[in-house]
Amino acid sequence: MVDYDVKDLSLAEKGKLRIEWAGMHMPVLRLIRERFEKEKPLRGKRISACLHVTTETANLMLTLKAGGAQLALCASNPLSTQDDVAACLVKEYRIPVFAIKGEDRETYYEHVNRALDIRPNITLDDGGDLVSTIHSSRQELLDEIIAGTEETTTGVIRFRSMEREGVLRYPIIAVNDAKTKHLFDNRYGTGQSTIDGILRATNVLLAGKTFVVAGYGWCGKGIARRAQGMGASVVVTEVDPLKALEAVMDGYRVMPMREAAKIGDIFVTVTGDINVIREEHFKLMKDGAILANSGHFNVEIDIPALERLAKRRRRIREYVDEYTLDNRRRLYLLGEGRLINLAAAEGHPASVMDMSFANQALCAEYIAQHGSELKPGVYPVPEHIDREVARLKLESMGVEIDSLTPEQEEYLKSWEAGT
């Protein structure tokens, strides 16, 4: 038996069926897996992955294993693990997994370190905890690491900060910034799954509610559009004038959080920053306001301040904590302020993660082949990988597109032709 720490291996059969279901909706990754099985481009490589342990991630792990890699997987968020999936990967596929839904902080980092014990050549991160642990307490691993990838905006922000400060010790490919990732995963995946998480946790009606979205990046755009589609009146808060202007032109009300706090019924943070909703805002909110986060870390809502203000706290539903303030107003925090789409729901639809994880798999192959040519820093996904993922996705959907004629190609290269 492989090394592991999961909740219950008896859940494996349920997990296997769910992994199979997700795989049916991930045709691009399936095509890559079929090629990997023949070519074994990752043979001899050790890969440590810190990702949300979901059915979609399981299909990525199976693809990497098909490519010949030795794997170890831990969760990138204490509440994002699907325990039946973790059990299946261990029992059915002999992949070491260290993840239990609801694990405490100490266990979380113990699991991160156990995933690193295979001494990886390649790291796959979602939020940056794997890489930051290597740089802070596992520096003995650095000599064997070729490069890594990063799945989400929060992690890319962290690694670019490390790059600016000159402390990033190995190359990172920003999978999050691939067009076939952030234009689809962030907008369509986060948009749908965040609403799904809120509805599963609360069963509230969105129609007629004032729905406040903090942050109008690609995730915020997706959430705002879907909340609007369900009948909510959407308010956007921003600090970037360009994004704020875009939100206005998209038809949303834009205002500071201090004004939105007075009128909002449901609040969702997707900024990647700290204390976006804080004490001054809690004091302005109406009775019954719902607070959720879809950013990677549970720091966007100032939970310590909410706990200081509260005279009473109780869990009123499985993923809903009620905080009663001194004026008897009640605020409801969903999923302990963690990623609501994974805390209370199942994360992104598999068909969206198909493209994100296809990028991960092909970038792992690229690192195995070309990673030694890269210096420490943050790199974009090579354009040929991004375009190949898009091509394969269109092919799987039965969609054909035009190609340039030789005349058109020549015209685009020339400068002589004018009016």
Image (cartoon, rainbow, N blue to C red):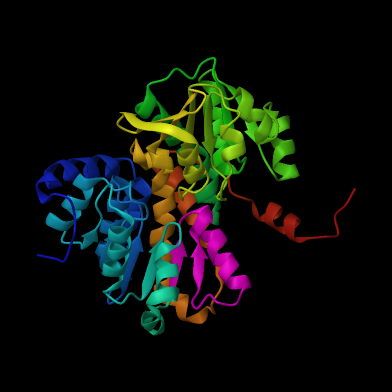
Query: Can you see residue 365?
Result: no
User: Is 148 a magenta residue?
Assistant: yes
Above-or-below relation of 86 to 397: below
Residue for point 40% across, 31% down: 312
The extreme right residue here reads: 419
Residue for point 28% across, 65% down: 110
Residue for point 39% across, 47% down: 354
Above-or-below relation of 187 to 30: above
Query: Can you see residue 61?
Result: yes
Residue 84: image location, x then y, percent: 19, 45
- Segment tinted magenta in the rendering: 147-176
User: Is 402 a magenta residue?
Assistant: no
Residue for point 38% across, 68% down: 123
The extreme top residue here reads: 208
Q: Is residue 251 left or right of residue 14?
A: right
Q: Is residue 216 left or right of residue 182?
A: right
Compare residues 132 and 73 and report the one nearer the observer. Answer: 132
